[in-house]
Amino acid sequence: MDLLNTLVDKGLRRETPTRGEALAVLATSDDDLLDVVAAAGKVRRHWFDRRVKLNYLVNLKSGLCPEDCSYCSQRLGSKADILKYTWLKPDQASQAAAAGLAGGAKRVCLVASGRGPTDRDVDRVSDTIKAIKERHEDVEVCACLGLLSDGQAERLREAGADAYNHNLNTSESTYGDITSTHTYADRVDTVRKAHAAGLSACSGLIAGMGESDEDLVDVVFSLRELDPDSVPVNFLIPFEGTPLAKEWNLTPQRCLRILAMVRFVCPDVEVRIAGGREVHLRTMQPLALHLANSIFLGDYLTSEGQAGKADLEMIADAGFEVEGAGEVTLPEHRAGGGCGSHEGSGACGPATAEPVGSAPEEPRTDLVAVRRRGAGTDLAPNA
Ligand code: SF4
C-alpha cells in the first residue's frame, strides 16, 4: 500500500506525516490491519529495537478529587467503588515501588489525585522520591501530580524527579466536553513548565471517549508539537459510577490502528500503552507490542491489570525483551532530554467509522476490576 510505504519512509526519517495520512491510518480496513501493524512495527524496531520498557504505577493518594474529569473514577461525585486514601508515607510508597522494580520495571510513576500539588505536597513527594532513590539508585522517577504552579517543577527536579506526566487527553476543541474545572491550555502550560525545568516530559491521550478521528489526530499532532519524550496512550476504562460508564466504543482493531497512527506521528518517541490495555486489546495485546515500546507492569491506579507475570510472559512469547536498567530508552538524538496520564495511566473516519459496541446493561466486572491490592491496602501488590 502506497500509504504505508510513505509512512514507513517518513517514520525512519522522523518526518511528520500529513493529517490526511494520519486519518487514513485510522480509516484502514480490518483486511489491511496486519499490514498497518507490520509497517508501524518497522518504525518501532528502527528506533527501539525489540525492547519493551516497563513502568510501575504507585498511587500516592487515591480518590476524593475536586476536579470533574468525566473519564476518571477519582473525580468529584464519582460513585465508583474505588480505594480512597490520603498520601502514602515515603516508606510505604518506596515499598510499593520496590515490588514493581523487582518485577522488572525501570520507571516508577508517582501519581496523586487532585487539581495540583500544594507546596507541602511537593515536599511530601520530594521525600518520597528521595526514599525511593536511596534504595534504588538507577530507577527513573516520574511524578504525576496535576497542574503545576510556578517553581514546583524545578523543586521536583531538584528532589531527583526525572520526568513529569501530564496528559492532554483529547483535542483542544473537545476538551471542554470532558472537563469543566480546568482547561486544555492549563494542561499545555503544565507540560511546558515540566519541560522548561529540565524534566523529561510525558504527555499522552485517552481514546474511546466518543471522540472523532479528527480529534485523535488533533491531539497527537499537538503532542508532537509539545515534543514529549513519552506518549502514553490510554484506552478509556468505562468505570461504573462515572459519566463515561457506557462508552464502550473501542475494538482491539481500533486500538491497534490508534497505536499505529501515534507511532507514525511520533516515530522516535516512547509510545506507552497505558490504562485499558487488557480491557480493550484483550487477546490482541501482543500485536500492540509491535507498535508501542513501553507498557505499565501490573495494576493501574484504581483498576487491576493482568498479573505482572503474565505481562512478562507475553513480552517473551511475542519475541520482545524487557529493557534493562542500564539501557537507554530513547534514540541517541533524543537521549538526555527531559517523558503520561493522570488518571488514565491508572495514563490517538469519525469515531463511528468503527462499529460502536452497544452500551452493556450490566457493569462489565469481567473486564473492569477495581484495584483492591497494593498501595493503600494490606495486600501484596501485583508486580
Ligand atoms: S484525572 Fe486527575 S484531576 Fe481529573 S478528576 Fe481524575 S484525579 Fe482529578
Image (cartoon, rainbow, N blue to C red):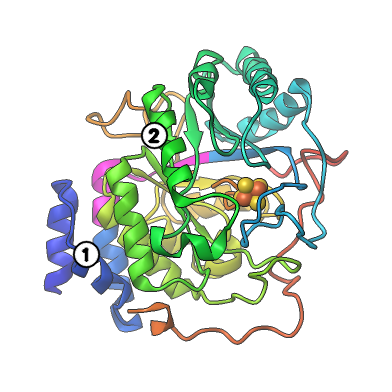
Q: Taking 202 as reference, is 22 above or below it?
A: below
| Quadrant location of the N terminus in the rendered image | bottom left
Q: What residue is drawn where x is 49% and y is 68%?
A: 284
Q: Which mark is residue 19?
A: 1
Q: Earlier in the sequence, mark 2 or mark 1?
A: 1
Label 1 element class: helix
Residue 346 makes an appearance in the image: no
Rendered view: 26 above or below 18: below
> 55 or 158, which is in the foreground?
158
- Residue 209, numbered circle: none
Q: In which quarter of the image is residue 382?
A: top right
From the viewer's perspective, is residue 353 above or below residue 274?
below
Of the pair 368 and 84, the residue shown nearer to us: 84
Image coordinates for residue 63, horizontal then vertical, percent: 76, 47
Residue 145: image location, x then y, percent: 60, 35
Q: Which of 323 and 198 is in front in this view?
A: 198
For mark 2, does the 10 Å Cα neighbourhood hold few (<14), some (14 to 19), or many (20 or more) residues?
Answer: some
User: Could you say which quadrant of the image residue 68 lies in?
Assistant: bottom right
Q: Position of residue 61 (x, y in %)?
A: 74, 38
Read off the residue under disc 2. 192
Label 2: element kind: helix
Q: Is residue 268 located in the magenta-colored stretch of the structure?
A: no
> What's the magenta region?
42-54
Q: What residue type is labelled 2?
A: Arg
Whole-number angstrom distance, CA of label 2 to CA of label 1 = 24 Å
In the image: residue 266, left or right of residue 5: right
At 37% from the left edge and 57% from the top edge, which residue is drawn? 219
